[in-house]
Image (cartoon, coloured by chain):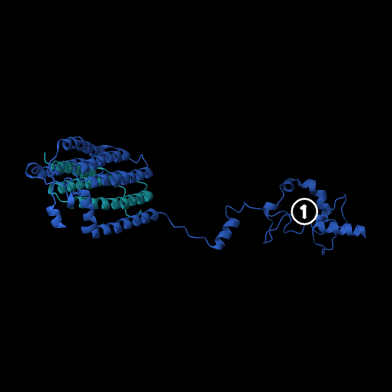
Amino acid sequence: MSPTIYLLLSALLFAIGAVGVLVRRNAIVVFMCIELMLNAVNLTLVTFSRINGSLGGQIMAFFVMVVAAAEVVVGLSIIMAIFRTRRTTSVDDANLLKY
Amino acid sequence: MSALLAAAPLTGGGEMSTGESVVFWILGPVALAGGLGMIFSRNAVHSALWLVLTMLSLGVLYMVQQAPFLGFTQIIVYTGAIMMLFVFVLMMVGRDASDSVVEVLRGQRLAAAVLGVGLGGLAVAAVAETLTTVGPVGLGPGYGPEARGNVQALGTSIFRDYLLPFELTSALLITAAVGAMVYTFAGRARRATPSQKERVVERLRGPLSGYGSRSGPGVFATADSVATPALLPDGSVAPASLSSIIEATRRERLDTDIADVRSDTGPASGVDARALTGHADGDGDRVGSTHDRLGEDESEGAR
């Protein structure tokens, strides 16, 4: 069997993550859905790396992980700042930037 | 370097072995179930745990896909650090902060489901053709210079070919850490430091003014009798120095004492109540405590 079947799994995971971003209202869960999409793309990169016999995909997945870690730190602190002022994490209630 | 890479033997690993197929057909559905569980669970903590399941499955899938370094990094960084951060934030926000079921936009969930199915279908259809047409090369154990495996080749590549981006990620991480700290302390209102005058006013007139040692009776007065109240610096009577026993005594019981004090002839009884006023002898220049007068009496008696 060809390892391109991993690409199908990755496509399905990415679609699930996209649906989650559209459907969920909790900002933290939306953030987790974004992480799922990043993971799906990482799986794609690793699979491409294997198919092509080149390490470029793995290196790019590595950098995606680093950027995702930084993004999670900043994003969660933004969510916490919003939660401290609005006492909610729902994306419907965060309609003003300051208050 | 590139010549070395080109000359190095690529020892296959492109096609999936039977064991890898078994792993894939077990962990692939598990990963999908984790993603679906994350979407459909009402509780945010359950969503996080479902996502942990997906990430662990993906980590194992990386390992069987000849990317052991990324597999371990996935488990350590994603499930170990990032998901722990998610769970921490969820616990700080509150576990029962679940989603509202109210649909703000009419038909948004249905549209999202249709769009998601369409996106998945399109992506699957786009890559489905590669199932048969692509011949994978693979990154088998004989990969890299001197066939040392792809982890060593990955390290060499990161620290040689991608050194500048790697250094830039350190700047990115430091910026993210500093930004997170700034956001953490941004919500707190900065309290103004009170001036010395404000502190004194708060101590003397504020809610804490009743604490500490009070002035005793007669400290600033002309006599040290309990009946003589202490005076504040502005001349008024300090309420805290008033004796509750004397205040509670009936006026009629004090009439004789008051008459004694007002009379010039001296006490009717043995006790000289005029000591309370500080004018015991009536000439006005002997102002002092009863201790002073007692001492004078003793000296006079000795004389």
Q: Residue A16's spot in the image, x, y percent?
A: 20, 42
Dividing the image into 4 quarters, which one contains the C terminus of chain B?
Answer: bottom right
| Residue at x 27%, y 59% (from the top left corner) | B167
| Residue at x 76%, y 47% (from the top left corner) | B251
Residue B41 in view, yes or no: yes
Residue B106 in view, yes or no: no
Give the answer, above or below, for where B54 lies relative to B273.
above
Count all numbered tags in the image, as a single digit.
1
* Front residue of A61 and B162: B162
* Front residue of B53 and B182: B53
- What chain is tagged by disc 1? B
The chain letter corresponding to blue is B
B206 horizontally vs B216: left or right:
left
Q: Which residue is situated farthest in the left direction here?
A: B133
Q: Amino acid at mark 1?
A: Ser
Q: Which residue is situated farthest in the right direction here?
A: B303
Q: Secondary structure at mark 1?
A: loop
* Front residue of B165 and A25: B165
Q: Would you name the residue on which mark 1 appears?
A: B225
Q: Residue B254's spot in the image, x, y percent?
A: 79, 48
Dividing the image into 4 quarters, which one contains the N terminus of chain B?
Answer: bottom left
Q: Which residue is situated farthest in the bottom direction here?
A: B285
B32 horizontally vs A92: left or right:
left
Q: Residue A47's spot in the image, x, y percent?
A: 16, 46
- Mark 1 burial class by Cα count in 10 Å: few <14, some 14-19, many 20+: some
What shade does chain A have? cyan
Q: Residue B97's spot in the image, x, y percent?
A: 34, 41
| Residue at x 34%, y 56% (from the top left corner) | B179
